[in-house]
Amino acid sequence: MPTELKPGLHWVGVIDWGIRHFHGYELSTHRGTTYNSYLIMDEKIALVDTAWTPFQEEFIRNIRALVEPARIDYVIANHAEVDHSGSLPALMRLCPNAELVVSKRGHESIEGHYHQPWKFRPVATGDSLSLGRNKLVFVEAPMLHWPDSMFTYLTGLNVLMPNDAFGQHYATAFRFNDQVNQQELYEEALKYYANILTPFSKLVLKKIEEVVALNLPVDMICPSHGVLWRKDPLQIVAKYQEWARQTPERSAVILYDTMWEATRRMGEAIGVGLAAEGVPYKLFHMATSDRNDVLAEVFKSKAILVGSPTLNQGLLPTLMPVLEDLRGLRFQNKIGAAFGSYGWSGESPRVIEEHLAAAKIPLAAESVKAKWQPRPADLAACETLGRKVAAAVKAG
Ligand code: FEO
């Protein structure tokens, strides 16, 4: 059901309460999501972004509640990823004369997804499009988070529609930030940033500076997922600046997998050492923990300790996804250490250190390994490792 946001500006998106995995199965979405789309009714009619394909009928019903799609003059596709562009084929069949406004890279990616001879209108930063009373101004935002990403700003109503930036995977009964649980909202906003935007943090800072320098008044920030920032809308911009600087808390996370509890006991002993030095930590069994929730904790923390028993001269495979994310998400300002039990050859700490090196996470202390079940001396070495890492956390 559409929601009027301001006179002439309507949310016509879809709430997806049921989705629990996004990007296929790459990203967990415990609280569902929304696919936000905005209909602007001026002398010309414009629609900003669409919804994911399985929701196209509901999405088009929402538009029809306000206007016949054939009357739409412009469809703005800020980003080609299918959660926002998936309803384009169904929509464009209903408004074949509408121009499809895209960034230059968006032209390439939308064409590449749908292979349709739509009336593309590529735009660049600073280009604008008059709708009558108000106009749309476009700002390319490459790598926030795809090369094609673009922000659209609506003058007069002072609304920024930045697509994925400032979004959250958060299905809610109400549309605005001041109507929802603030702790849930910020948990989802941070998880979204940590899992999607972290590698582009320098670009986030630059883009915010660039947009601020345009001196555009911003009454509302309307991202493509989750709630819309109406109350103190720049609070999320300030949060993004803070997150993009990647200044971690003085805390640690211990990620491990275990076969017969030896590596678990080592991880717990490391925790004793960290806590004894006053450094808070969280310990995650990666075979049973949600990887994306863990990455949000990694994002917040200074130290990352990773443990695995040696299996087939390497690691338990359950650790590989999070190690791949440590590399790909390019976390900054971290320190790391490795540990693990073994029976015969004992390569696992060295292999973990190689992964930490690939993630450009420097080691804070030498690794600890224990043969078979750890003896008291092994557990004491783990506790010492925890104390050493704690000292480095506090020094950092
Ligand atoms: Fe990059 Fe919400 O899609």
Image (spheres, rainbow, N blue to C red):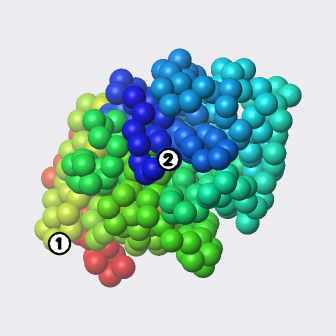
Q: Position of residue 71 (x, y in %)?
A: 67, 31
Q: Amino acid at mark 1?
A: Glu
Mark 1, secondary structure of its residue:
loop
Viewport quadrant of the N terminus: top left
Q: Which residue is mark 1?
A: 277
Q: Secondary structure at mark 2?
A: strand
Compared with residue 120, is residue 25 higher up or lower down, i.e. above or below? above
Does 351 sit left or right of 20 as displayed? right
**Residue lying farthest bottom?**
395
Residue sitting nearer the eye, 165 or 249 = 165
Q: Which mark is residue 9?
A: 2
- Mark 1: few, some, or many residues within 10 Å (few <14, many ≥20)? some
Residue projecting furthest to the right:
117
Look at 71% across and 49% down and name the residue there.
Answer: 148
Question: What x and y, as percent, mark residue 269?
Answer: 19, 54
Picture quadrant where residue 111 is located: top right
Find residue 137 and name its label: none
Q: Give the vertical position of 387 relative to 194 (above or below).
A: below
Front one among 195 and 221: 221
Vertical position of residue 326 compared to residue 51: above or below: below
What amino acid is at disc 2?
Leu
Does residue 225 appear left or right of residue 394 in this picture? right
Q: Is residue 321 visible?
A: no
